[in-house]
Image (tube, rainbow, N blue to C red):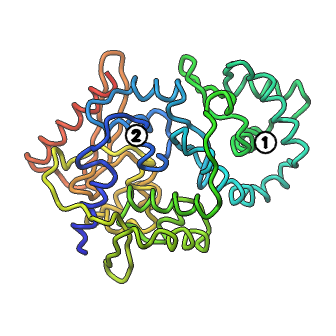
């Protein structure tokens, strides 16, 4: 497998080259989970993978519970299909709780406090009520549960892991929380092996070609558990090598096809960036040195040209327009600039 083939297959499997899904829930189900650290830009991460989507459409999917925004996997914010979120949390939450252990001791949090805070959340959010973070903090303080320092973060995350709360819709510009059970319909559970196999197959089909190390990093699973998941589905995947590494992807690798646009405005924390531990193949020449935070592309909005990083970009929402500032690593030729202008127009249309 060549670098060009690897990038083309990733662009296709990640639905960036030629979108194959018609709505956001189907797309997110295919991907397994889409990181949603930056709420506003996560809508573009979904929308750019769909034909003719709008930010209002994605926003409505979140508001209606067709997409669930919660902490899962590594853990960080993700958008997850409601049919998947229960088994994903059951699989990943034990590992996340282990990671939280040292913070719990430092912040003097324990099971007794978490049970008490969960009861507060259940009481104040019942019957469809949705509250913002400061309102929930005020309710906890009434119950004499301290929310100083990082305690509030961990009280909320623990309640998410316990499937007590998740995000609700937005109130004005504020993100709310709602009761998990009132937003997520019941779903059949999975055994640990079934969940490992399902997560591995979902990841390698939608993000491949990728390595075992990539899957472990994306899922938050220890390498031993990630390897177990991969071994359960390896006969359902295509295996290829690039350099000295073994990559796994869909049984029938995507063949290079002409794409409507091979110049893309990728948002920060996008799956094309965060889903892989080794990102050397996406750097074009000296692009790593041109990025902020020691060359880490996760924190920047990325200009992607034929699957490789060609610069960064920023957006500013004005009253009547969206201003896009471009920071190419090297000047774009006329052809690339024309395709980039088309992508900028698509971004503005999405938010119009």
Q: At 58% across and 23% down in the image, what residue appears?
A: 174
Left or right of residue 139: residue 77: left
Mark 2 neighbour class, 10 Å CA radius: few under 14, some 14 to 19, many 20 or more: some
SS state under label 2: helix
- Above/below status of 223 relative to 98: below
Q: Quadrant of residue 345?
A: top left
What residue is shown with label 1?
151
Tell me residue 65's x, y (percent): 54, 29
Checking the image for residue 229, the label placed there is none
SS state under label 1: helix
What residue is shown with label 2?
26
- Above/below status of 50 relative to 205: above
Tell me residue 58's x, y (percent): 42, 29
Tell me residue 59's x, y (percent): 46, 26
- Spatial separation of the CA atoms under disc 1 and disc 2: 35 Å
Report the label total. 2
Q: Nearer the viewer, residue 80 or 155?
A: 80
Name of the residue lying farthest toward the bottom: 244
Q: Quadrant of the N terminus?
A: bottom left
Mark 1 neighbour class, 10 Å CA radius: few under 14, some 14 to 19, many 20 or more: some
């Amino acid at each position: 497998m060549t670098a060009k083939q690897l990038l083309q297959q990733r662009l296709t499997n990640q639905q960036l080259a030629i979108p194959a899904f018609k709505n956001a829930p189907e797309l997110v189900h295919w991907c397994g989970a889409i990181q949603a650290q930056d709420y506003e830009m996560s809508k573009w991460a979904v929308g750019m993978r769909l034909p003719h989507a709008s930010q209002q459409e994605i926003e409505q999917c979140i508001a209606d519970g067709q997409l669930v925004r919660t902490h899962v996997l590594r853990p960080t914010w993700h958008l997850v299909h409601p049919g998947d979120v229960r088994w994903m949390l059951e699989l990943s939450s034990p590992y996340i709780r282990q990671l939280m252990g040292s913070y719990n001791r430092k912040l003097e949090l324990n099971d007794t406090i978490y049970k008490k805070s969960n009861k507060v959340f259940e009481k104040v959010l019942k019957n469809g009520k949705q509250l913002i973070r400061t309102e929930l903090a005020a309710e906890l303080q009434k119950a004499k549960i301290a929310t100083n320092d990082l305690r509030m973060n961990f009280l909320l995350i623990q309640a998410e892991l316990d499937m007590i709360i998740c995000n609700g819709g937005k109130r004005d510009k504020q993100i709310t929380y709602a009761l998990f059970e009132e937003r997520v319909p019941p779903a059949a559970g999975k055994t640990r092996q079934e969940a490992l196999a399902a997560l591995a197959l979902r990841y390698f089909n939608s993000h491949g070609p990728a390595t075992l190390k990539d899957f472990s990093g994306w899922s938050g699973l220890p390498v031993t558990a990630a390897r177990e998941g991969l071994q359960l589905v390896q006969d359902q995947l295509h295996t290829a090598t690039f350099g000295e590494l073994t990559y796994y992807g869909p049984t029938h690798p995507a063949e290079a096809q002409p794409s409507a646009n091979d110049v893309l405005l990728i948002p920060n924390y996008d799956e094309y960036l965060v889903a892989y531990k080794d990102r050397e193949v996406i750097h074009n020449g000296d692009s790593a040195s041109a990025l902020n935070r020691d060359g880490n592309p996760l924190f920047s909005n990325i200009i992607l040209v034929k699957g490789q990083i060609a610069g960064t970009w920023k957006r500013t929402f004005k009253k009547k327009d969206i201003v896009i500032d471009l920071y190419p690593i090297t000047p774009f030729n006329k052809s690339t600039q024309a395709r980039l202008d088309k992508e900028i127009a698509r971004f503005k249309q999405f938010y119009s």
